[in-house]
Amino acid sequence: MKTTLNSLALFGGTPAFAEKLHVGRPNIGDRERLHQRLDEILDRNWLTNNGPCVQEFEARLAALADTAHCIAVCNATVALEMLVRAANLSGEVIVPSFTFVATVHALQTAGVTPVFCDIDPATHSLDPKLVESLITPRTSGILGVHLWGNACAVDLLTEIASRHRLALLFDAAHALGCTHEGKPIGGFGAAEVFSFHATKFVNTFEGGAITTNDVGLAERLRLARNFGFADYDKVVSPGTNGKMSEISAAMGLTSLESMEKFVATNMSNYRSYRRALSGIPGLSLFTYNEAERCNYQYVILVLDEAAAGISRDFLVKALQAENIIARRYFYPGCHRMEPYQTLFPNAGAHLPATEDLSRRVLALPTGTAVGDEQIKVIGELIRFIVAHGREMQTRTA
Ligand code: T4K
């Protein structure tokens, strides 16, 4: 345990951890089962193009999301791009700025203008009261994000979308295995998109999937995923190469088999962080609704600089020096990234909660690579840094 400023890595001390602790360290499931699946793939000599592993992965996901259709894709960004086109979005779409930039890029890439809407600071997701005020005759849809796996204001957004005849889509990249009012995320709106990037708690190395109950949309998405091919030599629509490979689906199936174990670890880590950080002035954890099913894959710390006496950025710097690679998700907000900053230079004026929160949030390491003992050390360190924050900031100034 560190008890002097000089023992902190920032001031020349030995880092608290010899190896870096990452936010997104991949969870690896049953290696033997994965190797077995890889052998089966090689024996079949069928590596991609809607192979049996992909089909099985899609069936498992559709069951999990309780949807009629699931389309597995090479990553969630391409899935979002395909969906924006297949849902015929045009003109303007309302979207949060406080999200990973891929959400917004998917609109921009499809020639749709993103209209940034502010968030509710309590949920970190779209504020439905503000959504309605942004609807214009050019609006064709709303793209909500279930940030940190917590359902956004699904019911109010559904009501607004239906009253204004808008398409409603959800970026559910963080929300596999989560529920809203007991119903699995995946079946809300016209369609939802999951990510299985290596850093997600269930992963396919790279990968994504779209779930929907709309058969027409599912058909268009299947075509779009495979260049628009309806049959040999027969292309019936524009399309891309959005296919998931067999090796990715094999990883996904193996990962799904350990999903409950990963969730249990994440939940236990979340509770350990809650204990380890309790009572530290100016710090609070983003709280999950334990009445719902959650995957707890992100541990999100929200810092009140005035009460903590230390800035978020200083805390991140001090933690990273200790090999705790905390991340400033999703700083500085998409509206401050290109091309949006140039296109909409005044967007920030209408996004006070986004601007404020993106300066105060940080994600802490979790997943199967992190355990109780490490979290205790991280908690003690944060407690010490906050207690001596002013002194430390003066010393580094
Ligand atoms: N919508 C939302 C709301 C999203 O959050 C995302 C992706 C998407 C859409 C798009 O989904 P995909 O197209 O990616 O399927 C990471 C991920 O690359 C990204 O998938 C994820 N969200 C985002 C929140 O996080 P970075 O730029 O932070 O990645 P990186 O390389 O810094 O990795 C994060 C940490 O994980 C690092 O500390 C290192 C560690 N790591 C990473 C990889 C890849 C490992 O330990 N092993 C690994 O293999 O974006």
Image (cartoon, grey):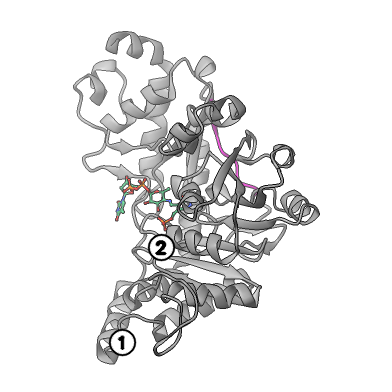
Residue type, numbered disc 1: Trp
Residue labelled 2 has its Cβ within 8 Å of some atom of ligand 1: yes
**On screen, 61 above or below 84?**
below
Find out whether the residues at labels 1 and 2 contact each other: C-beta distance under 8 Å: no
Position of 149 with respect to 130 (left or right) is: left
Instruction: Tell me residue 228's x, y (percent).
Output: 45, 77
Residue 85 lies, in percent from the top left, at 54, 63
Query: Looking at the picture, which amino acid does disc 2 mark?
Result: Asn
Residue wearing tag 1: 46
From where the camera sits, is residue 176 visible?
Answer: no
The residue depicted at 38 percent of the width and 71 percent of the height is 241
Residue at 40%, 40% (x, y): give it.
375
The residues colored magenta run: 283-289
Q: Is residue 199 visible?
A: yes
Residue 326 magenta-highlighted: no
Q: Residues within 10 Å of mark 1 (few under 14, many from 20)?
A: some
The relative height of residue 246 versus residue 65 in the rendered view (above or below) is below
Q: Earlier in the sequence, mark 1 or mark 2?
A: 1
Residue indicated by mark 2: 75
The label shown at residue 77 is none
Q: Position of residue 45 (x, y in %)?
A: 26, 89
